[in-house]
Image (cartoon, grey):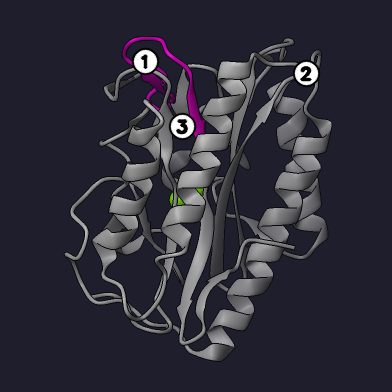
Amino acid sequence: MIITKSLAELETMREAGRITAACLRIVGEAVRPGITTAELDALAEEYIRGEGALPAFKGYHGFPATLCTSVDEEVVHGIPGPRVLTEGQILSVDCGAIVEGYYGDAARTFPVGAVSAEVTRLLEVTRASLEAGTACCRPDMRLFDISHAVQHVVEDAGFSVVREYVGHGIGRTMHEEPQVPNYGPAGKGPQLKPGMVFAIEPMVNAGGAPVRSLDDGWTVVTEDGSRSAHFENTIAVTEEGPLVLTRE
Ligand code: MG
Ligand code: MG
C-alpha cells in the first residue's frame, strides 16, 4: 500500500527536506582536494543536530555515519573515514534528516576540484534524469512513468542505470512502499495520487550496469570499475504537479 500524506504532514516533510538539502549544500561547498570524508561527515552531523533534527542514516541498520560518501567507482553506501579526496575524483553524498518523525532523503555528486569533460557529462546526465523523473510526479501519471523517464535520459546518453538499488516511498520511515526503479515500462504501475511522496534516486554508471558489494558490508561499487553518479530528491505528488521537498 502506498501511504498518502496530508498537507500538514507535507509541511513537516518540507522542513526535513530543507535541512537535508541545506546540509548537502554545506557539504558540497566543503568538498575539495585534501579534505577527508570523515571531516565532511562531522560537518553534516553538526549542521543537522544544530537545526534540531536527527541524522536519518546514523544507526540505520547499523550504518555508522550521518552521510554515505561514495568516491568514483563507489555507487552508494560508502562509509566516511580517513580517506583524503584528490583532484579529479567525484564524491557522491547521500544524506537524510528526521524532523518530528518525518524523513527527508537526498543525494548529490560533487566534483573534487577540476574533473574531465566526460565526468562532467556523467554528472549532468544523472541530474537531468532525476529532473525527468521528477516531472512525472503528477496525478495523471503512473509509477513506472517515473522509472521510464529516468532510464530514457540515461541510456540515450550512453550510460547505464543500476538495477539492484532503487528509489522508494518515504514518510514516517525512510523506506516505504513502493519501490521506484530507475528503469521500467511507461504507462504501467499504480496511478499516482496527490500526497504520495517518493525518493527518486538515479544511480548512473559510466560503464556497465552490474554492481557488487565490498567486504565492509556496505560499500557498493561498479563491477567494471567505471565511475558512478547519484542524485536524489524527496518529491511529493500534488494536484499542481511535483513538489520537491529536499530544497532550500
Ligand atoms: Mg538517499
Ligand atoms: Mg533514498
Q: Position of residue 144 (x, y in %)?
A: 25, 60
Residue at label 2?
A: 113
- Crowd band around label 1 with a 10 angstrom C-alpha radius: few (<14), some (14–19), many (20+): few
As helix, strand or loop, the secondary structure at mark 3 comes to strand
Q: Position of residue 52 (x, y in %)?
A: 77, 65
Task: Give the amino acid at mark 1.
Answer: Asp
Up/down of 132 relative to 163, above or below: below
- Residue at x 40%, y 66% (from the top left corner): 136
- Residue at x 76%, y 39% (from the top left corner): 27
Task: Give the amino acid at mark 3.
Answer: Val
Which of the marked residues, 2 or 1, is nearer the chain's N terminus?
2
Asked if the magenta segment contains residue 217, the reply would be yes
The residue mark sitting in front, 2 or 1, is 2
As helix, strand or loop, the secondary structure at mark 1 comes to loop
Looking at the rendering, the stretch of residues picked out in magenta corresponds to: 214-231
Residue 4 lies left or right of residue 38; in this view the side is left
Task: Give the amino acid at mark 2.
Answer: Gly
How much space separates mark 3 and mark 2, taking CA atoms?
21 Å
Q: In which quadrant is the C terminus drawn?
A: bottom right
As helix, strand or loop, the secondary structure at mark 2 comes to loop
- Residue at x 46%, y 40% (from the top left corner): 62
**Quadrant of residue 71 within the rendered picture:** top right
Residue at label 1?
A: 215
How much space separates mark 3 and mark 1, taking CA atoms?
14 Å
Which of the marked residues, 3 or 2, is nearer the chain's N terminus?
3
* Tag shown at residue 100: none
